[in-house]
Amino acid sequence: MADLQTTAPERNILTFSEPEHELALATKDLHVYYGENEALREADLQFERYKITALIGASGSGKSTFLRSLNRMNDGVARVTGNIMYRDLDINSNQIDVYEMRRHIGMVFQRPNPFAKSIYDNITFALRQRGVHDKQELDEIVETSLRQAAMWDQVKDELHKSALALSGGQQQRLCIARAIAVKPDILLLDEPASALDPVATAQIEDTLLKLKENYTIIIVTHNMQQAARVSDYTAFFHLGRVLEYDEARKIFTRPKVTITNDYISGNFG
Amino acid sequence: MKAKTADKIATAVFYAVAGLVVLILAFLLGYILLAGLPKLSWHFLAAPAQAFSAGGGIGIQLFNSFYLLVLAMLISFPIALGAGIYLNEYAKQNWITNVVRTAIEILSSLPSVVVGLFGFLLFVVQFKLGFSILSGALALTFFNLPLLTRSVETSLASIPNLQREAGLALGLSRWETVTKVILPAAVPSILTGVILSAGRVFGEAAALIYTSGQSAPALNFADWNPFNIASPLNPLRPAETLAVHIWKINSEGIMPDASAVSAGASAVLVIAVLLFNFLARWLGNRLYKRLTAND
């Protein structure tokens, strides 16, 4: 026993007890392999509904790999084992319709990637592909999505302008608007502000804080201040393992794991 | 040698080499145009060729060239588009795709005269299509397909993966993402590739000599029923093209003004190819601007 305790990594993983905490998503024993290389092991994380959870850790710690597994964006790229429980369904199973699932679990990427279409078409494209053609309904969705992404006032008069003519920060908020237009439950964000300047970053953070009233948000970030500012819960990834998962204020004030403390105080990574 | 000196010498060499390329092109163009332009007239562009007397034109050959081009493109573009989409969007890296890619490379390095002779044996003789526009168009497809496929493939590859991820993350299928997101974004560059390859096809002679033939029977431009033998649209009639015409005049032309006809026809051919190139640039830029800037 004593031996095991010294060799097993020091860990502190928060678990929620329902019904006080309603869960949006939970992973059980998730492993991700790129070929022979195990990039992530034994990830057991629960995500509470309508909260922002930040995933932090050094480059190569497996946090992005983990995030991209949650809506199966790693299909065909990596092998993912274990369970991802969403509404009593294991969405990591072969029987899941991934396209349908991704409408419930949306994603925003590190670099803004609007389509080479107008602002309006960027937001309505996925809806129209699904058979929503009512002009009034589409107009309403465009307005609410852009309002939620805090850019309606800036672009309401130029909705038919090409999205590629927008600034980087606006493009990224358009991508957020596009993701929420299909009304997902969960929004995954992979370092959404890392390619943006501080002003645009602050705007994105404001947007996220408003969005959490309606969405469960899981965000990967390299920016400690950002994680501390926006997240309710924070998970610290290190060398392919989750070493600590707790309320953000605890992680950033009194982490229980030594390596977490080293990382957030900038001693490595 | 000092780095600075080395840099200066290298710069000078590169300038000289680039200048040489431009000079050769300018000389060729200048020579062809100077010799051919004075010969050009509406009569020359529209009149049928004369075999024995002076004053013949290139009307039928010009029409044949364009018709053959359109037909060849109609056949080769859908195939190239499908192959390009498969190779860039769907194919996994395995031996099958390697075989396909190698096949395309080999096909693109085949000498066009070999393609022509192959087309002669297969289409003209075996399939009994005779010397015809159809045989020529099929041979041109062989000649054009590899480069067009490659061009479609590189156009698609230039669209960042982020766009594909954006589509997939919205719950769109790969097919929806490819056809509605990736393909439209790649249209300017695909179109440029198509027009540039059209220029090459337009000037091709060797692949056509034995497939679409070296004779240009009189056409009745009032008859547009493709089943009539004198109709310009009939795909089974023999059809000497402009490039083949130039080759033929220079090897066995016996009309008194053979060199003038050849010079004029060459000028028309060069101008057409130049126009294709300018059109490709202009259209590509315009479409790209429409996609990226305000519209």
Image (cartoon, rainbow, N blue to C red):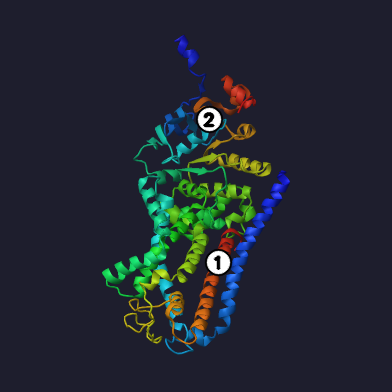
* Residue position for label 1: B283
| Residue in view at x 59 percent, y 75 percent | B31
User: Can you give x and y, in whole percent of width and height, for residue B95 in the image?
Assistant: 36, 46
- The tally of labels here is 2
User: Can you give x and y, in whole percent of width and height, for residue A43 in the image?
Assistant: 46, 28
| Residue in view at x 48 percent, y 46 percent | B165
| Residue in view at x 37 percent, y 65 percent | B115
Q: Nearer the viewer, residue A148 or A245?
A: A245
From this viewpoint, is residue B77 visible? no
Considering the image in quadrants, where does the C terminus of chain A appear? top right
Residue A61's disc is: 2
Disc 1 versus disc 2: distance between alpha carbons?
47 Å
**Which type of secondary structure does the marked residue at label 1 adopt?**
helix
User: Can you give x and y, in whole percent of width and height, for residue B119 in the image?
Assistant: 34, 67
Q: Nearer the viewer, residue A157 or A78?
A: A78
Chain where mark 1 sits: B
Chain where mark 2 sits: A
Task: Reply above or below: A3 against B157.
Answer: above
User: Can you give x and y, in whole percent of width and height, for residue A223 in the image?
Assistant: 62, 34
Task: Give the side of residue B20 with respect to residue B122, left or right.
Answer: right
Considering the image in quadrants, where does the N terminus of chain A appear? top left
Check contact, mark 1 vs mark 2: CB within 8 A. no
| Residue in view at x 58 percent, y 33 percent | A231
The kind of residue tagged 1 is Leu
Task: Give the side of residue B150 with respect to residue B274, left or right.
Answer: left
Comparing marks 1 and 2, which lies closer to the viewer? 1
Task: Reply above or below: A239 against A204.
Answer: above
Q: Nearer the viewer, residue B172 or B161?
A: B161
Residue A241's disc is: none
**Which type of secondary structure does the marked residue at label 2 adopt?**
loop
